Image (spheres, coloured by chain):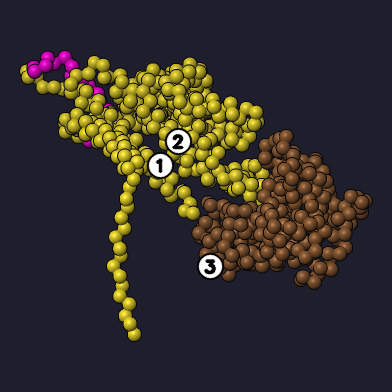
Chain colours: A brown, B yellow
Amino acid sequence: MTQRTMTMTTSDLSATNKLEDVQGDNSSFRGLETRAVHAWFGKHHALAGVSLRFPERTVTGLIGPSGCGKSTFIRLLNRMHEFIPSAAMAGSVLLNGSDIYDPSEDPAMIRLKVGMVFQKPNPFPAMTIRENVLAGIKLAHLKRDNHDDIVEQCLTRAGLWKEVKDRLDASGGSLSGGQQQRLCIARSLAVEPQVLLMDEPCSALDPGSTLRIEETIKELAEKITVIIVTHNMQQASRVSDYCAFFLTDGGPGYLVEADSTRKMFTNPSDPRTADYVQGKFG
Amino acid sequence: MTTVETPTPREMTVIYSRADRIFRGIVTAGALTSLLLLGLIASFLIFRSAGTFREFGINFITGTEWFSDGFREVGDESRADNSVFSIGPMIVGSLVVATIAMLFAIPLSIGGALYIEFYAPRSIYRILVAMLDLAAAIPSLIFGLWGIEIFTSFGVRWATFLNDRLGFIPIFSVEFENFGRSPFVAGCVLASLVVPITTSVAREVYSRTPRDLIDTCYALGGSKWGAIRSVVMPYGRSGVIAGAMLGLGRALGETVAIYLMLNLVFTYSYEILDSTGGNVASMIALKFGEATDKEISALIASGLVLFVITLIVNMIASNIVQRTTPRA
């Protein structure tokens, strides 16, 4: 698997870095792409001019110190940003070439295609494990008749099936923190997203659970695109194919550089990236 | 092999600081005082009403006659005291009117609370919340008076409509068309004075829904209604029930509005559009001024009954809350 992504690296990342020059040939790009994205909260300019490409079936880690706009950025990718009052954005986000902010797009449909897992494990408290997995299907009124298969499949992909298959009717809250987070991943998978956004999914978990989730992420990337915000450099180097480094100088957050994870950790172009990944600041 | 001796658990002691001890004393005194007050109230009620219960027994609760033999001179032993006290219809009336009130108030409150919390434009949100919380703090009588003014015309139209279309169902039939003084319209008025408190509580509870859970619904492609139905309402259920209980307490205990609206009639009546009815609280208010000693004892017994009804309703409600709250 590492081999596959490494071969993709050269072609896709040269495109990423020279994005401004290649505005023309986007129709062929499969995956998620942002173009000169800005974000504001009221008058506060939170994020400035981020252009990035997330090729299909890869894992990209978003790294950088707190407050540099990583979470803001990730919430722009499935239109969760707009739920914050006074939030605004500029630029465009393209999913397989079509702009998700186009007025004709239904945000709910976008979120079906671009799912999200949150920092704190948050299974729905009033629902059983099974109901949690199927919650998205119910919420989005999807027509599915093989519910049992979906539950098994999603829990298997999230690496939780063996642990819970005998107690699917137990409350989601009865699981441990790590299990809960894998349940949340299974819940996101049930609506078959093309992209899964993860906002520091392991920051509330113990090392063992973290490792399980990282394995899950790698397996997920065989089918879908994963974008993960993390403060943990080892985690970024373990799970991601690409990394994007964000920074702020007190003003809006911006993208310093994005490249293959190996290059970012061994020989980054920008000295600030080297300092950050070696733990010299942040 | 060495055998390991199981040690006896050590005693653990706590040393409270001076500030801790003083604060502990204050809160303990406060708690004991309120318990003592409650105990005193209960024993007063029981002591003063004992005579009534001894004389009329269960008939006090089920009977339909209230007659005070008030013309007998004090100490006049020449003839027996023929007073009969029982409050069956008033108990039923209390429950009927309060039920009607809650049937209107609960859906209104839930709808109103959801609107303010999730649909109202941000620009008027703060104003709405402030107004609602203020309204919840206003004495219910104010709303009662307003309700009487408004609902005796509105309510009468609804009552006429119900009677017209559904009059064949016994509870909607009437003997005389005097809808303005019917339990139905009184229930509408009670609803108007219950709604502010229940809405205020419901809104507060809904506003505490973890943002994370709502976001998750959206992230799964859910609509706002989907998020409300699958997260906000289940999360707030127990709180909303608790709020409804506060409202029900008000509805059961409401005195003046009922006193002003209903003809107190001591016959069982389930025709909610008929101009008969009453409730325990308003009956106490009506009779207290000119009551004889014996009648006062009966009125206090009525108070005790109301106290017990409220207690039972609250216990049922907290039971429901416990059973519907998921254990996390």
Quadrant in the rendering for residue A185: bottom right
- Asked if the stretch drawn in magenta spans residue B138, the answer is no
Whole-percent x and y of residue B38? 27, 34
| Viewer-nearest residue: B194 or A72 | A72
Crowding at label 3, few (<14), some or many (≥20) Cα neighbours within 10 Å?
few
Q: Residue at x 64, y 47 (%)?
A: B215
Task: Find residue A166 and name its label.
Answer: 3
Whole-percent x and y of residue B238? 47, 43
Q: Report the amino acid beneath label 1.
A: Ala
- The residue carrying mark 2 is B244
Numbered range of the magenta stretch = B58-76
Above-or-below relation of B128 to B320: above
Whether tag 2 and tag 1 are in contact, CB under 8 A, the answer is yes
Whole-percent x and y of residue A230? 68, 57
Distance Cα–Cα, label 1 vs label 3: 34 Å
- The residue carrying mark 1 is B317
Q: Report the amino acid beneath label 3.
A: Asp
